Image: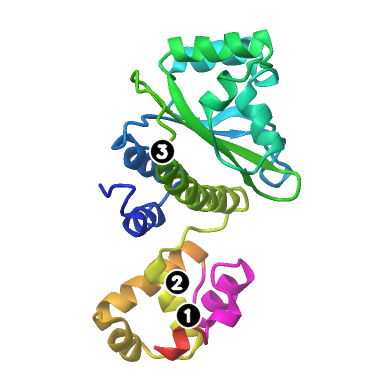
């Protein structure tokens, strides 16, 4: 498992996920190495593009008993992290909120109850989807770690969290619209198919065997319910799986 200091490897790992759940699992595993073993991805506004209402912990590794307690008490309405996410795009430390003398009593109580449930310290930030759609990503620790304001780590979590968000949301959109999940290699085969390359030519370009190219075509046909290459390429463009202007760049230059 790559460390967050190896951002490129972390991104490659998340990109290799086949499902939204797998992408979240990889994201959690990467951050757990730095002690941040509690993650939640919340819709802090309604998301019409996904047909989902606002909700705390659309996907989460927070303790189940805390999530139940949180929702039963409608804490999303007094959660200072949620309120901060709604008003700023800048990542922040939870302690910035707890140390605020003007924090309402009910919000202070909620944060202390969260700490008692194992969410001792954390960071959070907002992520944008469609216009008006905001996601909040919270990253917390279960231990008694003292917040040291590690801004380098904060920046790396923000970058990786943004990539995870884009990947996760894209997967949800594809599931919602019944768009097949095509692998990167299958996309390459589709791009070169759009260029009119033959299987032997693709094998040389991609550094794989002709049989492997044909295996990828068979998988593509199955996923797209397509009987031929031309239809598979056309359908993949229509569904947004490959983008026409990218057929010649960067693939054309290889």
Name the image quarter holding residue 47.
Answer: top right
Residue 89 vs residue 63, the one in the foreground = 89
Verify whether residue 176 appears in magenta.
no
Q: Residues within 10 Å of mark 1 (few under 14, many from 20)?
A: many
Q: CA distance from mark 2 to mark 1?
A: 6 Å
Q: Secondary structure at mark 1?
A: helix
Residue 229 vs residue 56, the one in the foreground = 56
Labelled disc at residue 48: none
Q: Residues within 10 Å of mark 2 (few under 14, many from 20)?
A: some
Q: Could one spot residue 40 in this view of the protein?
A: no
Badges 2 and 1: C-beta atoms under 8 Å apart?
Answer: yes
Q: CA distance from mark 2 to mark 3?
A: 39 Å
Identify the residue under disc 2. 187
| Of labels 1 and 3, the one closer to you | 3
Q: Where 191 falls versus 11 (above or below)?
A: below
Tell whether 22 sits left or right of 181.
left
Q: CA distance from mark 1 to mark 3?
A: 42 Å
Q: What residue is rendered at 64% in x and 15% in y?
A: 101
Q: What residue is rendered at 36% in x and 21% in y?
A: 142
The magenta segment: 226-248
| Of labels 2 and 3, the one closer to you | 3
Verify whether residue 231 appears in magenta.
yes
Q: What residue is rendered at 47% in x and 58% in y?
A: 181
Estimate the x, y position of residue 111 in percent, counting from the top left.
55, 15
Labelled disc at residue 191: 1
Identify the residue under disc 3. 150
Residue 1 vs residue 55, the one in the foreground = 1
Estimate the x, y position of residue 172 in percent, counting from the top left.
56, 47
Estimate the x, y position of residue 242 in percent, counting from the top left.
54, 72
Q: Where 250 falls versus 17 (above or below)?
A: below
């Amino acid at each position: 498992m790559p460390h967050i200091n190896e951002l490129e490897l972390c991104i490659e790992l998340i990109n290799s996920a086949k499902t939204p759940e797998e992408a979240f699992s990889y994201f959690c595993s990467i951050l757990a190495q730095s002690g941040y073993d509690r993650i939640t991805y919340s819709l802090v506004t309604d998301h019409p593009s996904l047909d989902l209402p606002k909700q705390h912990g659309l996907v989460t590794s927070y303790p189940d008993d805390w999530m139940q307690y949180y929702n039963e008490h409608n804490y999303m309405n007094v959660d200072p992290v949620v309120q901060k996410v709604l008003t700023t795009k800048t990542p922040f430390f939870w302690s910035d909120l707890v140390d605020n003398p003007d924090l309402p009593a009910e919000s202070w109580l909620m944060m202390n109850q969260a700490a008692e449930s194992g969410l001792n310290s954390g960071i959070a930030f907002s992520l944008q989807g469609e216009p008006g759609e905001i996601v909040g990503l919270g990253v917390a620790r279960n231990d008694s770690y003292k917040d040291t304001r590690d801004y380098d780590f904060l920046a790396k979590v923000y970058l990786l969290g943004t990539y995870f968000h884009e990947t996760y949301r894209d997967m949800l959109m594809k599931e919602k619209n019944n768009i097949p999940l095509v692998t990167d290699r299958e996309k390459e085969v589709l791009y070169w198919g759009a260029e009119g390359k033959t299987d032997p030519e693709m094998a040389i370009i991609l550094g794989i065997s002709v049989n492997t190219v044909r295996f990828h075509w068979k998988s593509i046909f199955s996923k797209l319910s397509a009987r031929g290459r031309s239809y598979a390429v056309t359908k993949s463009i229509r569904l947004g799986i490959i983008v026409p202007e990218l057929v010649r760049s960067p693939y054309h230059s290889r």
